[in-house]
Each structure stands twice: as structure tokens, then as C-alpha cells.
């Protein structure tokens, strides 16, 4: 059974998502992009939560490498899976926005390419865990550390290299009518992330308990 | 007088050359291709509903597409996660019953 906090968090997140479109519709249109800029209110919060998930996986992997506790490994695996899901959303919604705003689906600039590399690293992590066999937990933890090290590079890339992607100054400079729906969605996606992470960790715990029981029955 | 004659000859030559060269310049101007029609609404304003279909790129399908991607991906993941959790918990309960029965 899941703890009571997970359904509560899910309910609050769903309620927030239910009213989010109204707040987003009330936000003013951006002067050059118009309607399509409204993708920002989902695209950027999912990107932020993806970074949170990446750091969760990275620090849990570091803890696993240092202390070797199964709890850390389960948290790392759960957050890696969520990083792949959230990364896929970011990498699919971004081109939909870019096609209208920039006229192209994709640009091989530093921000987009490094985000794709991050997603590939965590997809590699999951493949290692799925098909690597026993003992690949530590190797996968190393991959997660590389993935986490990529995050500051992704964040600062728009300020350092030439790109069409909006810079990091956009969010702090949002007008209040745009800022409110943005942070509303950030909080909603964070709640959803925590609820899904706890559920995924629960799945890993149950799987480990089942594997242990089956191993005891065989011996 | 010779100095005045030289000035007069120079001016005459200049005028002859100008007269002779003008048609050539006009012809060259006529042959120069016109700059392509601008698309920046400098010559005329075209209402958006009069644009050819091939040039229209409305934002709504991209916006709706992005929102469908977000909710579709999350819904699929949540369903898969719930299904996996339900299966593992059922297997665990069964294994616990079998272990308790022995």
C-alpha cells in the first residue's frame, strides 16, 4: 500500500493542473511569438523538474557509491526513469514551439544538443539496469554522475554560446501576469514528480522484497 | 587663349561622353533585376486570411500538440507504473502465502 501522502499530493497536483489553463489563458501574449509562447508554461516547468530529477538521481547514486545502501540505489533508479520521461516531454514540446517561433524543428546548438545528450545518458542508465545483469548498479551510478554533471552545462549554455533558445534571464524578468502561471505550473509539476517518485520507489521496494523471497524459496 | 581653348575642349568632351553614356546607363538600369518582393509588409498589408494555405502556420495546432504530448506521456507513464506496481504486489502476496504455507 502507498502512503497517504501520495494520493494527497496527486489530488492537489491534479487540482492545480485543472485550473492552470485558466491562469495560462489570462497571461498576456508575448509580443513576438504570440499564442505559441504559451507552450512555455508547461515546457519550462517540466525542464526544471527534469533537472530536479537528475540531481536526485545523481546524489542518490553518489550516496550509493559511498555507502552502498539499497535505499539510495532504489531512489536513483526511480528518479532516472522519471528523468527519461520528463526529458522526452521537454524534447518533444520544444520542437513544437521552435517550429512556429524559429521556423525550424531543431537546431544543433549547445542547449538543445546537451539536453539530448542528458536524455541519452539516462536512457543508457535504464538500459544498463535492465539488461546489464547483476552488479551493474555501480556502473549505472557512474553514468548518473556524468548525467548530473551535464546539468549546469545545459543551464548556462544559452548564456555562453550563440543560440536561438531564450536565455536564463527570461524567467527572473517575467511580468507578474506571466510569472504567476509559470510558478503555479512549477509547483504542480513538482508535486506530481514527488508523488510519482515515491510510487516508483515503492515499486522498487516491492520488487526487491519479491526477489528476496523467491531467492529464499529456491535456496 | 590656348588655356581657354583647352577648358572648352574638356567641357565639350565631358558633355559628349555624358550624352553618349546616358542611354547605356539607362539600358543597364533596365536590365538590372528588380529586388524580390519583400515579405515584411513594406509594400502592402495582406490580411492573414488571404494568405495562401501553404504559407499559413497557425500556432494553435502546435500549442495543442505540445499539451497533448505532456498529458499523453504522463498518463501513459502513470498507467504503466500503476500496472507494474499492482502486478508486483500481487506476486509478492502470492509468494508470501506460499512461504507461509510451508
Image (cartoon, rainbow, N blue to C red):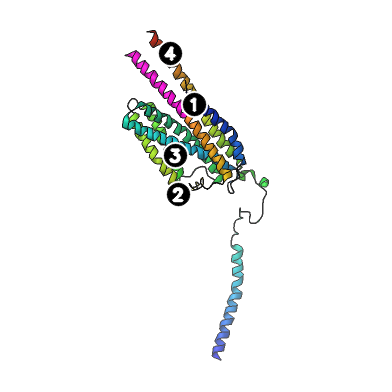
Q: Residue A199 or A3: which is nearer the viewer?
A: A3
Q: Chain of mark 2?
A: A
Q: Residue at x 44, y 40 (%)?
A: A115
Label 1 – label 4 distance at C-alpha: 27 Å
* Magenta residue check for A159: no
Q: How many marks?
A: 4
**Residue that numbered label 2 is attached to:** A159
Image quadrant in which the C terminus of chain B is located: top left
**Residue that numbered label 4 is attached to:** B94
Label 2 – label 1 distance at C-alpha: 39 Å
Q: Residue at x 43, y 50 (%)?
A: A160
**Residue that numbered label 1 is attached to:** A5
Q: Chain of mark 3?
A: A
Q: Residue B67 or B12: which is nearer the viewer?
A: B67
State yes or no: discs 1 and 3 in contact (Cβ < 8 Å): no
* Mark 2 closeness class: few <14, some 14–19, many ≥20 residues within 10 Å: some
Name the quadrant containing residue A208: top left
> Same chain for marks 4 and 3?
no
SS assignment at label 4: helix
Report whether B22 appears left or right of B94: right
**Residue that numbered label 3 is attached to:** A116
* Mark 3 closeness class: few <14, some 14–19, many ≥20 residues within 10 Å: some
Amino acid at each position: 500500500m502507498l502512503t497517504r501522502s501520495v494520493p494527497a499530493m496527486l489530488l492537489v497536483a491534479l487540482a492545480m493542473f485543472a485550473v492552470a489553463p485558466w491562469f495560462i489563458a489570462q497571461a498576456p501574449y508575448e509580443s513576438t511569438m504570440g499564442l505559441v509562447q504559451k507552450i512555455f508554461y508547461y515546457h519550462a516547468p517540466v525542464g526544471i523538474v527534469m533537472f530536479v530529477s537528475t540531481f536526485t538521481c545523481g546524489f542518490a547514486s553518489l550516496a550509493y557509491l559511498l555507502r552502498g545502501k539499497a535505499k539510495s540505489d532504489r531512489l536513483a533508479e526511480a528518479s532516472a526513469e522519471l528523468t527519461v520521461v520528463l526529458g522526452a516531454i521537454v524534447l518533444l514540446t520544444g520542437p513544437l514551439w521552435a517550429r512556429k517561433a524559429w521556423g525550424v524543428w531543431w537546431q544543433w546548438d549547445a542547449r538543445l544538443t546537451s539536453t539530448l545528450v542528458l536524455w541519452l545518458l539516462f536512457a543508457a542508465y535504464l538500459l544498463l539496469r535492465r539488461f546489464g545483469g547483476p552488479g551493474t548498479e555501480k556502473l549505472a551510478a557512474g553514468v548518473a554522475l556524468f548525467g548530473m554533471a551535464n546539468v549546469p552545462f545545459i543551464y548556462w549554455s544559452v548564456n555562453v554560446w550563440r543560440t536561438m533558445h531564450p536565455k536564463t534571464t527570461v524567467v527572473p524578468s517575467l511580468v507578474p501576469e506571466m510569472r504567476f502561471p509559470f510558478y503555479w505550473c512549477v509547483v504542480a509539476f513538482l508535486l506530481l514528480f514527488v508523488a510519482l517518485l515515491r510510487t516508483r520507489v515503492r515499486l522498487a521496494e516491492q520488487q526487491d522484497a519479491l526477489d528476496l523471497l523467491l531467492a529464499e524459496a529456491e535456496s | 587663349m590656348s588655356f581657354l581653348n583647352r577648358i572648352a575642349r574638356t567641357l565639350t568632351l565631358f558633355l559628349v561622353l555624358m550624352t553618349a553614356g546616358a542611354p547605356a546607363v539607362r539600358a543597364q538600369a533596365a536590365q538590372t533585376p528588380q529586388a524580390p518582393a519583400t515579405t515584411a509588409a513594406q509594400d502592402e498589408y495582406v490580411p492573414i486570411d488571404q494568405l495562401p494555405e501553404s504559407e499559413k502556420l497557425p500556432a494553435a495546432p502546435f500549442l495543442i500538440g505540445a499539451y497533448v504530448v505532456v498529458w499523453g506521456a504522463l498518463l501513459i507513464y502513470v498507467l504503466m507504473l500503476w500496472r507494474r506496481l499492482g502486478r508486483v504486489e500481487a506476486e509478492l502476496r502470492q509468494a508470501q502465502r506460499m512461504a507461509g504455507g510451508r
